[in-house]
Amino acid sequence: MTGAKRPSFYSLGDDSIESPGLPWAQSILEGMTMCDPCVECGGIGSTFSEEITVALDHHKGRTWPDVLGCGAEPLLIVSKKVLDAWEADRISGVPRARPLRIRPPMPSGLIGRRPPPYYWLDGEHARGAMLDFDRAGYVDVRFCNRCGRRMDNIDATYDRQHGSVCPEVFREGTWTGRDILTTDLSPCAWFCTEAVVRSAHSHRLTNFRFVPTELGGRSGFSSVKYL
């Protein structure tokens, strides 16, 4: 459309590292299965069942957030309040949300405080664009022909991304219009449009981390202060 404003994109995740008072899922007890190493590239992946059960760090947490951080796997875990807000605001591209259970004991600071219903989002079925790996600073990107695992020159990529700002830009014409999406970077690397940021502000959704994609990378930059 001529004259249409280009949408703003953000990396999307939790801000738990900057919020020490929030709980942290430190291990997955049920629902995750490690796969055998790929016979071609040697990579080891994992599969998830319909429902996941996690255990929390016993020493972290005084209040329940709307986005729950997870150290065991880089999962995007959101509360029902988030899903309801996205539905009310007609956020597009929301993937299937699957139940996540928390096994007691709870952190001492959360004893007697019932957690909200939490769900994990399946990034395998949320691809909505292709990343421009060269502009994003990745060197020698390739994909395994058998399992599809992405690989790159880790040392060269690190040097390039830490030597200059490498924006996470989508390849021209590949964005499908989803407000919430993953790319060929990883099914665990989430992106979103400004509409998701506005929704988080409007509904007072806690513990989101939004970083403008033009800043590059998924860490090292302060997140947008949306509340």
Image (tube, rainbow, N blue to C red):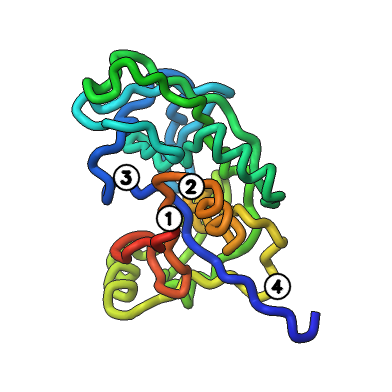
Marker disc for residue 204: 2
Q: Nearer the viewer, mark 2 or mark 3?
A: 2
**Residue at 79%, 85% in the rendered image:** 2
Residue 69 appears in which quarter of the rendering? top left
**Residue at 64%, 42% in the rendered image:** 95
Q: Is mark 2 on a helix, strand or loop?
A: loop
Q: Which of marks 4 and 2 is in front?
A: 2
- Along the horizontal axis of the image, is 87 left or right of 78? right
Real-space Cα distance between discs 4 and 2? 33 Å
Q: Give the vertical position of 102 relative to 197 (above or below).
A: above
Residue 223: x and y, percent?
37, 61
- Along the horizontal axis of the image, is 49 left or right of 75? right
Marker disc for residue 173: 4
Q: Is mark 3 on a helix, strand or loop?
A: helix
Real-space Cα distance between discs 2 and 1? 7 Å
Sequence-first disc among 4 and 3: 3
What is the three-letter code of the residue carrying label 2?
Answer: Arg
